[in-house]
């Protein structure tokens, strides 16, 4: 795919086994589920601190949801439940380093979920592991990924026990009381000098708790906080927030030892835009134990006040790949770059007839940045064209590919940065599914470079699978190209109508 130079370590950990892999797989499922497609691992040792960490990476063909926990019932192991992801072309088990973990095993639970079991060399604490997902990023040739980091526990020297030491029996029926989440309050602070805003959410607890947090886009932009040693007390199930930085916070009981806090964000944020920490009690100031969540409001680059119709709109159309980058190649050697350009030109013609001004990132078979560019330079050049011309929306056109030739269908990807991105993806997807007649794979949040780095609502449309012989054939016909071009234009028209009803703002 794109030209990019990575160091050997990052290539081993993060590269996807096949370019263009961004869709769900099993056609018998509705909607199609992602597949666990590849597994790799390495152990990193910190030369300064002397600590070691095992990183396990599992590629998936689409977004999944994960939830993990430790167990000692059959020896120490870490179990990760995977929702919306099933086993694909992956070994049932893979040996690991043997010092931090012995092996990882994969089990299908049902047609909708699977389970990952990691046999640990020694038992670890909850603070010694982290599980998170990463979106696909075509710019860096990365698939969707599940990442599991496991720290090697630092062994504590055991003092020898004197011979006269008496071991006291332990009453297993008595467990330490867990802290309760008892109260929630919030405020938005605006910095008068810098003009920035921050939402501070404070949850009182009756004792100390441990927290672990991460961002997700699977169910819309969310911040999820797992709370160990803290359970739901006298607190509402959900509390409405300001509606500009975050919409609401929800509290969920996980088990007798854990709970979960989910903050529904108005727009997606970066990892640097939030902070989660705990504070001890302070009796002198009449303060309880507290959990604090700070969320910065991303500085809006543009304010949108959309009107109905296509007339007068500035629309950036990006024909994916081109020049030295052919994109995905079908079984009959049809190249993705040729189809994306043909469709983009037809979309341009239809939009201009409707009175829109169309900005094309490329109109011929060329590299947009120029020869010998890196992947980031090439993709940023496409985003720059849309940003400099202050386009109202950005549409990047692509064709998908996968190792299984029976997989097919249309899909749209968005990065919710403006408040309109998911709306744009939904409107284009609905119309593409109707006019193409192909399987409707829906919309998904993703971190593709061009939709993340453009300032306006943006979408990356996958118009079918070039790896599917039937779809490769029809994608290469003028009539089908015209049909999907009409679907995209209708989707844009529907988007502006709905966006106008929503009103202004970011």
Image: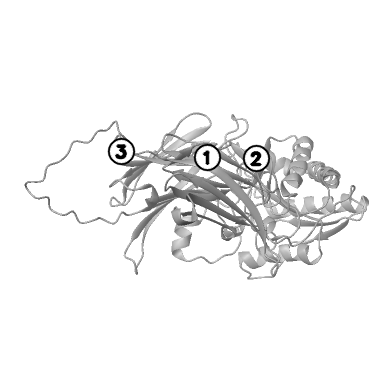
Crowding near pointer 3: few (<14 within 10 Å), some, many (20+)? few
- In the picture, the quarter occupied by the N terminus is bottom right
Q: Is residue 253 above or below residue 344?
A: above
Sooner in the amino-acid sequence: mark 2 or mark 3: 3
* Whole-percent x, y for residue 489 in the image: 83, 46
* Whole-percent x, y for residue 107 in the image: 42, 34
Q: CA distance from mark 2 to mark 1?
A: 21 Å
Q: Which mark, residue 428?
A: none
Crowding near pointer 2: few (<14 within 10 Å), some, many (20+)? some
Give the camera-side residue of 297 and 484.
Answer: 297
CB within 8 Å, label 2 to label 3 = no
Q: CA distance from mark 2 to mark 3?
A: 49 Å
Which residue is under mark 3?
Answer: 72
Left/right placement of residue 465 relative to residue 35 reads: right
CB within 8 Å, label 3 to label 1 = no
CB within 8 Å, label 2 to label 1 = no
**Circle 1: element type:** strand
Which residue is under mark 2?
Answer: 469
């Amino acid at each position: 795919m794109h030209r990019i130079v990575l160091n050997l370590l990052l290539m081993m950990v993060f590269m996807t086994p096949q370019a263009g892999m961004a869709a769900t797989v099993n056609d018998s499922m509705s909607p199609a589920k992602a597949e666990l497609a590849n597994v790799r691992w390495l152990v990193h040792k910190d030369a300064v601190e002397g600590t070691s960490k095992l990183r396990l990476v599992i590629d998936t063909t689409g977004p999944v949801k994960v939830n993990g926990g430790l167990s000692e019932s059959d020896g120490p192991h870490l179990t990760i439940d995977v929702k919306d992801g099933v086993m694909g072309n992956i070994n049932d088990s893979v040996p690991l380093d043997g010092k931090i973990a012995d092996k990882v095993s994969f089990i299908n639970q049902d047609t909708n979920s699977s389970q990952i079991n990691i046999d640990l060399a020694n038992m670890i604490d909850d603070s010694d592991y982290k599980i998170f997902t990463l979106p696909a990023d075509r710019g860096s040739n990365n698939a969707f990924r599940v990442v599991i980091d496991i720290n090697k526990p630092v062994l504590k020297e055991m003092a020898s026990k004197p011979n006269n030491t008496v071991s006291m029996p332990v009453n297993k029926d008595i467990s330490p009381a867990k802290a309760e989440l008892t109260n929630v309050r919030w405020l938005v602070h605006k910095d008068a000098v810098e003009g920035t805003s921050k939402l501070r959410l404070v949850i009182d607890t009756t004792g100390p708790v441990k927290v672990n947090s991460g961002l997700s886009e699977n169910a819309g932009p969310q911040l999820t906080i797992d709370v160990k040693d803290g359970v739901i007390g006298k607190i509402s199930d959900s509390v409405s927030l300001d509606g500009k930085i975050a919409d609401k916070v929800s509290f969920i009981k996980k088990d007798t030892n854990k709970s979960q806090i989910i903050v529904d964000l108005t727009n997606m944020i970066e990892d640097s835009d939030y902070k989660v920490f705990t504070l001890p009690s302070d009796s002198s100031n009449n303060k309880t134990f507290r959990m604090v969540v700070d969320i910065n409001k991303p500085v809006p680059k543009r304010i949108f006040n959309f009107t109905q119709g296509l007339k007068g709109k500035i629309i950036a159309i990006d024909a994916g790949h081109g020049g030295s980058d052919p994109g995905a190649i079908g079984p009959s050697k049809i190249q993705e770059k040729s189809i994306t350009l043909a469709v983009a030109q037809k979309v341009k013609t239809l939009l201009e007839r409707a009175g829109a001004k169309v900005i094309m990132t490329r109109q011929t078979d060329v590299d947009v940045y120029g020869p010998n560019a890196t992947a980031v330079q090439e993709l940023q050049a496409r985003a720059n064209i849309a940003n400099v011309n202050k386009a109202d929306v950005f549409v990047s056109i692509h064709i998908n590919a996968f190792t299984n030739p029976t997989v097919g269908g249309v899909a749209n990807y968005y990065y919710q940065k403006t408040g309109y991105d998911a709306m744009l993806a939904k409107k284009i997807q609905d119309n593409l599914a109707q006019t193409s007649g192909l399987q409707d794979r829906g919309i998904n949040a993703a971190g593709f470079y061009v939709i993340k780095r453009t300032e306006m609502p943006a979408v990356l449309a996958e118009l079918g699978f070039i790896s599917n012989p039937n779809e490769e054939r029809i994608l290469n016909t003028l009539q089908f190209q015209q049909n999907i071009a009409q679907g995209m234009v209708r989707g844009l028209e529907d988007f502006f109508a709905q966006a106008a009803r929503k009103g202004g703002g970011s």
